Image (spheres, rainbow, N blue to C red):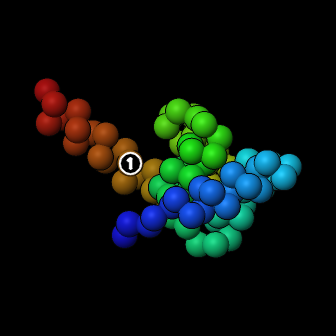
């Protein structure tokens, strides 16, 4: 499912300018029901971060730990398949 994150990015940027931390923005986005991917997109734009940095910050946040843990096996399988296919 595709989420247009532009409005969220603008709202989160305004919150950041008002003193809200990135941590608080992540909690807020999670509470709004955004996916981890959309949260990464928003944090990348709001924090002016690289994709890798945004992914690391979001996936290491406590509100996303259960999701990250649940997807580890799928991630590992995908990496193995990509390595096998690439050989």
Q: Position of residue 33 (x, y in %)?
A: 59, 72
Picture layout, residue 54 above or below residue 69:
above
Q: Looking at the image, which residue sits at the far bottom? A: 32
Residue 45, visible in the rendered structure: yes
Residue at mark 1: 75
Residue 64, visible in the rendered structure: no
**Circle 1 crowding by C-alpha within 10 Å: few under 14, some 14–19, many from 20:** few
Q: Looking at the image, which residue sits at the far top? A: 87
Q: Position of residue 58 (x, y in %)?
A: 61, 48
User: Exactly how many numbered labels are in the figure?
Assistant: 1
- Which residue is at a point 60% across and 62% down the rendered structure image? 8
Judging depth in this view, the residue of 69 and 41 nearest the camera is 41
Question: Where the N terminus falls, by quadrant?
Answer: bottom left
Q: In screen coordinates, is 73 left or right of 7?
A: left
Q: Position of residue 68 (x, y in %)?
A: 54, 54
Q: In screen coordinates, is 27 left or right of 75?
A: right
Q: In screen coordinates, is 32 left or right of 50?
A: right
- Rendered image quadrant of residue 85: top left
Picture layout, residue 22 above or below residue 67:
above
Question: Where the C terminus falls, by quadrant?
Answer: top left
- Rendered image quadrant of residue 25: bottom right
- Which residue is at a point 85% across and 49% down the rendered structure image? 19
- Which residue is at a point 37% across and 54% down the rendered structure image? 74
Picture layout, residue 18 above or below residue 7:
above
Judging depth in this view, the residue of 12 and 23 nearest the camera is 12
Local secondary structure at mark 1: helix
- Which residue is at a point 53% across and 33% down the rendered structure image? 50
Q: In screen coordinates, is 69 left or right of 78?
A: right
């Amino acid at each position: 499912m595709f989420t247009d994150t532009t409005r969220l990015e603008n709202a989160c940027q305004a919150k950041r300018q008002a003193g809200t931390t990135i941590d608080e923005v992540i909690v807020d986005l999670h509470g709004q029901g955004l996916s981890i991917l959309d949260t990464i997109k928003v944090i990348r734009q709001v924090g002016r971060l690289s994709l890798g940095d945004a992914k690391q910050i979001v996936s290491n946040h406590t509100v996303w730990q259960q999701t990250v843990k649940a997807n580890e096996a799928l991630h590992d399988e995908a990496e193995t398949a990509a390595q096998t296919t690439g050989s």
